[in-house]
Image (tube, rainbow, N blue to C red):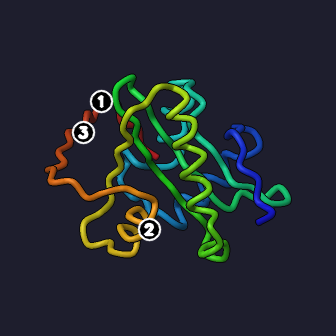
Amino acid sequence: MNESILQFEPLAHRSQVVELWQRVLGYGAAHNAPHFAIDKKLAVGDGLLFVAETVGKVVGSVMAGYDGHRGWIYSLAVLPDYRRRGLGSRLMRHAEARLKRLGCAKINLQITQGNEAVAAFYLKLGYQMEPRISMGKKIPVNITAA
């Protein structure tokens, strides 16, 4: 475990995080486009975007959010060659610790239905499946092309 977990730095990490998210998360929708998501996150300025780096190479990332009531986990990604080493768990614990320091009482996350491997990962970290219906509404005027 030589990876360091660091605060995201745009000049040092941006292109690598974009590549990581495209490779691992496969975001295709404009509202999830990595450049767009990073720009929106940086505009908030909450410091809740982290990378795992080894020898200058980004090998993982996690983005969190906090609205003063609930915390959220978004875009946890680890390169395939760095999985099953505890790096995803370390990234999650790091994000959780930052949310806890902000006063967060509960952390939520969403995964795609049918993704049992990812569900098992989060269950091991203490997350529970909750009987909820997730709903969303896109605001096209605020979504730029990737």
Closer to the N terminus: mark 2 or mark 3?
A: 2
User: Where does label 3 land, which residue?
Assistant: 138
Instruction: Judge left or right: residue 8 versus residue 118.
Output: right
Other-residue count near label 1 (Cα within 10 Å), few / some / many at <14 / 14–19 / ≥20? few
C-alpha distance separating marks 3 and 1:
9 Å
State the image coordinates of residue 133 (x, y, percent, origin top left).
14, 50
Instruction: Give left or right: position of 6 versus 98.
Output: right
Indicate which disc, 2 or 1, sits on the residue closer to the N terminus.
2
How far is the residue under mark 2 from the one under mark 1?
A: 36 Å
Q: Are marks 2 and 1 in contact (CB under 8 Å)?
A: no
Between label 2 and label 3, give the one nearer the viewer.
2
Percent x, y of residue 134: 19, 48
Mark 2: secondary structure:
helix
Residue closer to the observer: 8 or 131: 131
Left or right position of 131 against 46:
left
Q: Disc number at residue 30?
A: none
Looking at the rendered structure, the kind of residue marked 2 is Phe
The residue where tag 1 is placed is 141
Residue sitting at 40 percent across and 41 percent down?
72
Residue 90, percent from left and from top: 62, 56
Residue 18 placement (x, y as % from top left)? 59, 53
Q: Which residue is tagged 2?
A: 121
**Secondary-structure class at tag 1:** helix
Residue 79's place in the image compared with 60, above or below, is below
Q: Residue at x 68, y 62 (%)?
A: 59
